[in-house]
Amino acid sequence: MIRNYKIKKEQQVIRANNTGDFYKFVNRRLSCKRGIGASRDDTDKLVTDDKQRADMLNSYFSSVVSQDNETYTYLV
């Protein structure tokens, strides 16, 4: 019964053809409300600390972007 109820709700959102309703529906079902969830570092250790995650992202983006003649070039 629960599965059928969820399917019915999803179908209502689809039939409504309303972008706002769709995003509300999806956002209510996201498991991580804080933005970026837990990540794994190079040693496969789970990282949940905000500063550590920010440092990991900064390190990654720094490694795939280079500055050449005042223009940024993406390496991926």
Image: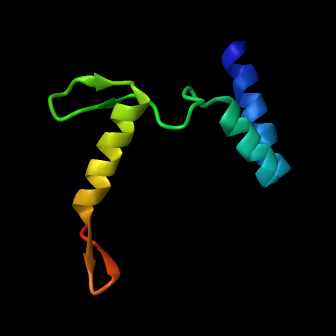
Q: From the viewer's perspective, tell me whether residue 18 is left or right of residue 48.
A: right
Q: On the rendered image, what quadrant is the C terminus found in?
A: bottom left
Residue 63 location, x and y as percent? 22, 58
Residue 28 location, x and y as percent? 70, 30
Q: From the viewer's perspective, tell me whether residue 66 is left or right of residue 52.
A: left
- Judging from the image, the colouring scheme is rainbow
Q: Residue furthest left?
A: 43
Look at the picture and state if 37 lies above or below 68: above
Judging depth in this view, the residue of 28 and 44 nearest the camera is 44
Taking the spot 78% from the left edge, 42% from the top edge, the residue there is 13
Q: Residue furthest bottom?
A: 69
**Residue 32: which quarter of the image?**
top right
Q: From the viewer's perspective, tell me whether residue 34 is left or right of residue 76.
A: right
Residue 11 location, x and y as percent? 75, 38
Total marks placed: 0
Judging depth in this view, the residue of 70 and 19 nearest the camera is 70
Taking the spot 54% from the left edge, 37% from the top edge, the residue there is 35
Judging depth in this view, the residue of 45 and 22 nearest the camera is 45
Q: On the rendered image, what quadrant is the N terminus found in?
A: top right
Look at the picture and state if 34 lies above or below 66: above
Taking the spot 38% from the left edge, 41% from the top edge, the residue there is 54
Q: Residue furthest top?
A: 1
Residue 60 location, x and y as percent? 27, 51
**Residue 68: which quarter of the image?**
bottom left
Look at the picture and state if 23 lies above or below 9: below
